[in-house]
Amino acid sequence: MKRFMTWWYAFSMPKRGPDTTPGERERSRYARLTSGFLFLICLLFVPISPIMIFDSPNSPSSPPIGIGTLILLACAFGFGKAGWNYISAAFIVAYNILCISAVMVTNPLDPSLLPLFGIFPISVIMAGALLPPIASLVVGVLCCLDIALISQLVPHTPAYQQMLDKGLFTVTLIVPVSIQLMISVMTYVIMRNLINTIRRADRAEEIVSLQQELALHVRTQVQQKQQLEEGFQKIAETHARISNGDLSVRVNLSEGHMLWNVAGSLNNLLNRMQRMKSDADMLIATRQAAYQVSNVLHQAVTMGTINNVHLPTTGTPLDPVIIELNNVARSATSHSQSRYGNTLGQH
């Protein structure tokens, strides 16, 4: 049944997003209640409407009544689907009044029909439940006027006329009207208090929700403040070590930290500075190695010991040149020794 009612609400109500405000929740409550009443009425009336329209030879008024009530229900469904809840509820209330009034008007007024006046309070209760509470008073007054007009204008049977002749207005008019007024006032008071209670509960729920959001916002602010303090502390420590010449230091912040982008940019800058320092140190070492190699070669040339030169490697880009120079020196030494050996052999 729950699944069926869920389908019915989806079928008979407009599609809306989730309710986030008390006004939207109140609108949805009225819409669901109106849709539920409409379903109950359709369940009771629609199955018998074909009989009223097509198979009532002894009651000429039944087909028009059946068609009129179907039109009212169709209008109630259409306005409810369009989101006009109050208009849909007004058609449902009008359906109930029409059903009772049509039966009373199309038949001579008889004491056997007097209990039908007791069904009018259903319209009052529906109006109070589906419309603003003041509607119960309005519908109650309309039902009282309807009862009075029916009692005075509809033709009477002899039995009903006999009651009037005996002065039994209390039974025929005063009691139904009194019941209408009493139920109208009670419905108005009850529904007004109920709606006020529901609205207070909605406001309390809204206040609790706002308090939770505020608490979450405060916690978020505290966490962000802690993140900022932690990030600034690490960045300050990093700057202090950089000022002391340590370019290998990095700002270690996790991804998602508020200062993660700043830390990433600083780390990239430090990487470039470290590479530049490494290149500068290598350039200085290369210059020093070139100066040393130049001095060794100059002394070897001056002393004529160029063939005996052996240059040590320096760990700089000059090492391939030094290795080639050493190879050349060894080749020259081997060539000189072979020539000297050949000369001795000739002598």
Image (tube, rainbow, N blue to C red):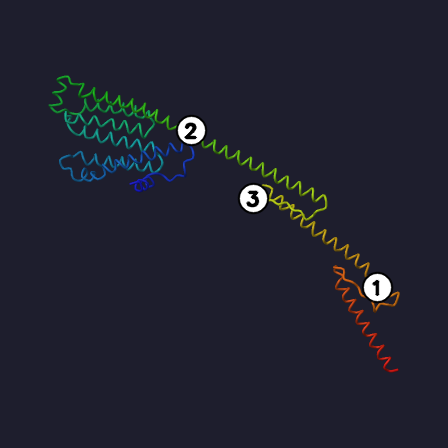
**Identity, as a three-letter code, of the amino acid under mark 3:** Gly
Contact check, label 3 and label 1, Cβ < 8 Å: no
- Chain-order first, disc 2 or disc 3: 2
Q: Nearer the viewer, mark 3 or mark 1?
A: 1
- Distance from the alpha carbon under mark 2 to that under mark 3: 36 Å
Report the residue marked by disc 2: 204
Q: Is residue 288 above or below residue 17?
A: below
Q: State the residue at coordinates (84%, 64%).
A: 297
- Circle 2 packing at 10 Å, graded few (<14), some (14-19), many (20+), is few
Q: Nearer the viewer, residue 346 or 245?
A: 346
Q: Secondary structure at mark 1?
A: helix
Q: State the residue at coordinates (58%, 39%).
A: 227
Contact check, label 2 and label 3, Cβ < 8 Å: no
- Chain-order first, disc 2 or disc 1: 2
Residue 241 location (% of width, % of height): 69, 44
- Chain-order first, disc 3 or disc 1: 3
Tell me the quarter of the picture where residue 225 sits.
top right
**Identity, as a three-letter code, of the amino acid under mark 2:** Ala
> Going by the picture, which residue comes out furthest to the top?
167
Report the residue marked by disc 1: 297
**Identity, as a three-letter code, of the amino acid under mark 1:** Leu
For the C terminus, the quadrant is bottom right
Image side of residue 165 versus residue 9, left or right: left
Q: Secondary structure at mark 2?
A: helix
Residue 114 location (% of width, % of height): 17, 25
Residue 117 location (% of width, % of height): 20, 26
Tell me the quarter of the picture where residue 21 sits.
top left
Q: State the residue at coordinates (39%, 39%).
A: 16
Q: Is residue 86 above or below residue 266?
A: above
Report the residue marked by disc 3: 256
